[in-house]
Amino acid sequence: MTLGMTLALFGAAISIIGGGVGTILGTLHVGSSGAGLVASKPKFFGLVLLLSALPSSQGIYGFLGSILILQQTGFLAGNASELSMEQGLVFLAAGLPVAILGLFSGAGQGKVLQSGLRIIANNAANVGQAVILGVLMESMAVFGLLLTILIVNGA
């Protein structure tokens, strides 16, 4: 395996790790606070579950970034290309936008949705407000994925 392919594999790994950690942190924030709400108001479990699931998209974006890198290098098909160091660095760089933005937007989204639980606790009919506030954080992860796609397709 060439140094270029090794660098590309690191790019794929960083992509999923960043998005995955963002998902974990975001879900941790919402789920831990949501458990307290459900303990006092069990009928809110479905709403808490909805808010807890929203940060999962960052992990999905990271996974997609990884798949795109692995597919473009031929690694998934079993015929990995001989990549130069420069080509490998491009794929490594391609994994960074979705990883970094997924990490921070997932963690931030979790904190925003954690606060959104207060909206639901006061009036469950306002769940849409909590979701909208949380989804605003999503845009950065989407932009990170789009940039990753553009870099991978240009490699």
Image (spheres, helix red, strand yellow):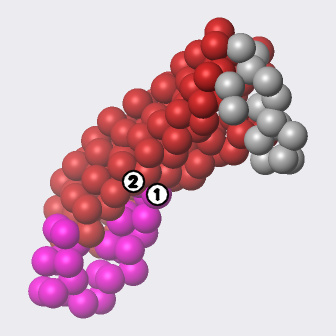
> Which region is colored magenta?
32-56
Determine the secondary structure under disc 2: helix
- Residues packed near mark 2 inside 10 Å, few (<14), some (14 to 19) or many (20 plus): many
The extreme top residue here reads: 86
List the residue tagged with mark 1: 56
Q: Is residue 150 visible?
A: no
Which sits in the foreground, 95 or 107? 95
Instruction: Tell me: residue 1, above or below residue 17.
Output: above
Amino acid type, residue under disc 1 in the picture: Ser
Question: Residue at the location (71% across, 14% down)?
Answer: 84
94 above or below 103?
Answer: above
Q: Is residue 15 above or below residue 93?
A: below
Residue 42 is one of the magenta-drawn residues: yes
Amino acid type, label 2 = Thr
Tag 1 near tag 2, CB within 8 Å? yes
Q: Which mark is residue 94?
A: none
Q: Is residue 110 left or right of residue 51?
A: left
Give the position of the C terminus as an image quadrant.
top right
Quarter placement of the N terminus: top right
Residue 68 picture quarter: top right
- Where in the figure is residue 104, as x and y percent of width and height? 33, 36
